[in-house]
Amino acid sequence: MKLVLIGCPGAGKGTQAKMLSKKFDIAHISTGDLLREQIKNGTELGKKVQQIMEEGGLVSDDIVSAMLAERIQADDCKKGYILDGYPRNVEQAEGLYDIVGDLDKVICYEVEDKVIVDRMVGRRSCPNCGKMYHISYNPPKTEGVCDECGTALIQRKDDNEETVVNRLKVYHETTAPVIDYYEKKGILLRTNGVGDINEIFENVCKALEGIK
Ligand code: AMP
């Protein structure tokens, strides 16, 4: 199964992608995570993209598309994959078609901008096990510490108000046209990204019934 998850930053794509990946036993590929890994490892590529990411801009298509093309060759992608954060513009969507052909479904998580800033500025994650928290809506039992593994939680550098506002602007200008692109192809599934995480997940699973 080949899926793409679309939605503005903070729409919940990462959380839903992890749940779908577990259910369908297919790889979860987040281009944002792949890029953050490069920064963490201090690679040349990481140095090139760090500032752009901290400002909330888009990394060049060449870099991201080459990284993605390599990642989907890995063994864990043989049964399928969920792309989270890619494609982010129509050029990337066209490039993706050239690499993998037709997708099974593109799921668009719809959330209004006014909900997003609050969601993202309070977002924290565990750098060890990846578990996500929110300081008000889903706090850990002990402030600043992961419930699962006891690691100190971190805040993404680009989850501050100024950068989030810029990321939303980039999303509306550049990524929103990708939604029309897939709508015209007849594979778009729009879903409400606000509400109970499990309910959002179940709604999508129902819509995916019958796809292998
Ligand atoms: P995300 O974790 O998906 O919110 O991505 C974090 C940042 O990584 C974005 O704000 C971009 O700077 C960069 N990024 C991730 N995916 C892409 C992509 N497909 N194209 C360009 N830049 C990307």
Image (cartoon, helix red, strand yellow):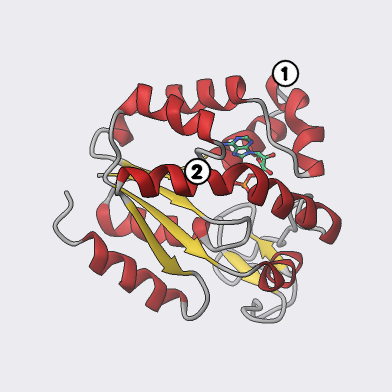
| Crowdedness near tag 2: few (<14), some (14–19) or many (≥20) residues, C-alpha within 10 Å | many
x, y percent for residue 143: 74, 76
Q: Quadrant of the N terminus?
A: top left
Residue where numbered disc 1 is placed: 44
Res. 49 visible in picture: yes
**Amino acid at pointer 1:** Glu
Residue located beneath label 2 in the image? 178
Determine the residue located farthest toward the front in the rendered image: 184
Q: In the image, is residue 139 above or below residue 113? A: below
**Number of residue marks:** 2
Res 73 visible: no
Number of the front mark, 1 or 2: 2
| Real-space Cα separation, disc 1 to disc 2, in angstroms | 30 Å
Q: Residue shown at 72%/76% (left/top)?
A: 135
Q: Position of residue 84 (x, y in %)?
A: 48, 47
183 or 18, nearer to the observer: 183
Furthest toward the left, the residue is: 210
For the point 85% across and 56% down, the residue is: 162
Outermost residue to the right? 162
Q: Which SS class for mark 2?
A: helix
Q: Is 210 situated left or right of 206 in this image?
A: left
Residue 126 appears left or right of 194: right
For mark 1, give the secondary structure.
Answer: helix
In the rendered view, tell whether residue 41 sits above or below residue 201: above
Query: Who's the residue at 28% across and 65% down the image?
Result: 205
Residue 132 percent coordinates (x, y): 59, 64
Crowd tier of the residue under label 1, counting other residues whose Cα lies within 10 Å: few below 14, some 14–19, many 20 or above: few
Residue 21 horizontal/vertical position (percent): 35, 53
Q: Amino acid at mark 2?
A: Val
